[in-house]
Image (cartoon, rainbow, N blue to C red):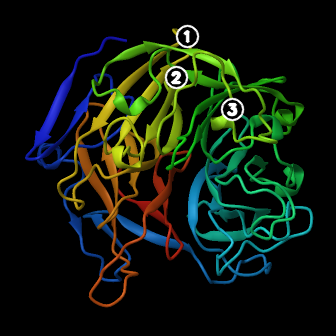
Amino acid sequence: MPVSRRSLFAAGGGIALSGALGALFTGRAGAMRQSTGYGPLLPDPRGLLDLPAGFSYRVLSRAGEPLRSGEGTVPANCDGMAAFGAGGGRVRLVRNHENRTTAALRVPAVKGLTYDPEALGGCTALELDASGAVTGERVALAGTAVNCAGGRTPWNTWLSCEETEDRAGTSGYTKDHGYVFEVDPADPHRSGAVPLTAMGRFAHEAVAVDPYRGIVYETEDAFTEPFGLFYRFLPERPLGGRGSLRAGGALEALRVPGVADLSVVDEPGAEFPVEWVPVPDPSAAGTAIRLQDFGPGGITHAQKLEGSYWGGDGVHFVSSYARSREGAGADHHGQVWFYDPLRARLRLDVLFGPATDIQLPGDSPDNICLAPDGGLMVCEDGGGAQYVFGVTVGGEVYPVARNADDIGPAGAPEWGEFAGVTFSPDGRTMYVSAYAPGTTFAVTGPWH
C-alpha cells in the first residue's frame, strides 16, 4: 500500500508514523493537542477510572472477591482478554491472570482444567447478559504460569500464552512451562488444559491468527539478551476449528537479511524482504529457541515484543521499547511493525521518540485492539500515570481512560498498567482491566 509519511514532534521527543495507520498509536504533546477524541478525562469520584464526559463504567470483577461459580476467589494480575458473542446480546469474556510463583491470589485448581497444580496462573471466564450484568464467572484454565497475553482464533476460542520458560523442578513446578493453551469460552472443559507443544516453548506474549490461511503469528517477550523472536506456526490442520492446533505443525522464525536487531531501524515506512527459517528445536529441550543455531544468516531479534493483532491483510506487532544499555542496537520507546504475508515484506509503521514526560502518551505500548471507528485502542505499560489511548486512522491520538486507583504508598502514587483492551461484538462496550489491583471494567458511552 502507498506510504505517505507524517511526523509529529514536541520538544525533546516525538513520534514518526508511516501512512495507512491500520497500525498504532500515539504522539507526544503536539499530537495530543491536535486530537479531539472524546474530550478531556474527568476525575472519577470513586477514584477508579477517569473517563470523558458522557462515558460511564461498570466494575465487572475485582481481585479477591468470590467467583460466582463458588470455585474460590477472583485471581490477581489481570492481563490479556477477549470478548466473544454468546447470542441474544450476551457476551463471554476470557481473561488471563499473569500469576508468578509469588501471586497471593492464584487461579483456583479445578479438576479437568488444571495443567500443573503447582502453577498459579491461568484464565477466568465471565458471562454477561444483554444488559451487561455479570451472570457467571468461573475458572477456564488453571495450573499454568505467567499467562500474559494471547489472541482469539477465527473459530472463537482464546489462545492463552505463558510468558515463561521454567521447567519442571524449577520454581516448584511439576511440569514444563512456556506453552500456548487453547480455551473454549463457551465450555472450558471441552478444551481442557492441553499445551500446544508444537507452537514452541518460549516466553510467549501474544498471537494473531491469519483468518484466511490459518497461520498463527507469535511474539516472544524477552527484555534481556538474547532478545525475543517473531514466529509463525504453520498448522497441519489450518483453520480446522477447536482442538485442531493439537495436530501439530511447523514453527519458523523471522529473519530480516542484514538486520540482526529490529531496534536499529529508525525510518517509518522502511520495508524489508524477509525469510522464514525453521526452528531447530521448538521444544527447547536443551537450548532456548532464541539461542539456537539458525545457520549462517543468523536470526533477527527484538527487545520486548508484545502486543499483536491481525488487521486488514497482515499482522501488526509491537516492540514496547529498546535500550542500548541493556544490549539493544539502538534506543526507542516503542515500534509498531506490519508484516504483509502476500508480499513477504516487513514494514516499520510507527516509531516512538525519546520520552520527556512519562505522563504523556507514548511510554511503552503493550496490548492493542481494533476500535469501532477502525482505529486502535492501546494500553500503556510504562511509568507514572497509566492510560488507554485511542488513535484514529488518520493518526490522531486521544485519551480514553486513565487509571485513578492509586496503589502506591503514601506520598508515592502508583497506578497499575492497563491490559486486555477489547470490544463487545456490537462495538458498544469497551472492556479493559487494570492489572493491579486486578479490576475488570466495562466502559460504555458515545463511541464513534
Secondary structure beneath dot 3 equals loop
Q: Position of residue 377 (x, y in %)?
A: 39, 46
Q: Nearer the viewer, residue 74 or 46?
A: 74
Corner quadrant of residue 91: bottom right
Q: Which residue is mark 2?
A: 314
Residue 292's disc is 3
Q: Residue at x 54, y 50 (%)?
A: 424
Q: Residue at x 65, y 60 (%)?
A: 146
Disc 1 + disc 2, Cβ < 8 Å? yes
* Residue 262 shows in the view: yes
Q: Residue furthest right?
A: 112
Disc 1 + disc 3, Cβ < 8 Å? no
Q: Residue furthest top?
A: 343
Q: Which residue is mark 1?
A: 342
Q: Looking at numbered disc 3 in the image, what kind of residue is underneath it?
A: Gln
Q: Residue furthest left?
A: 11
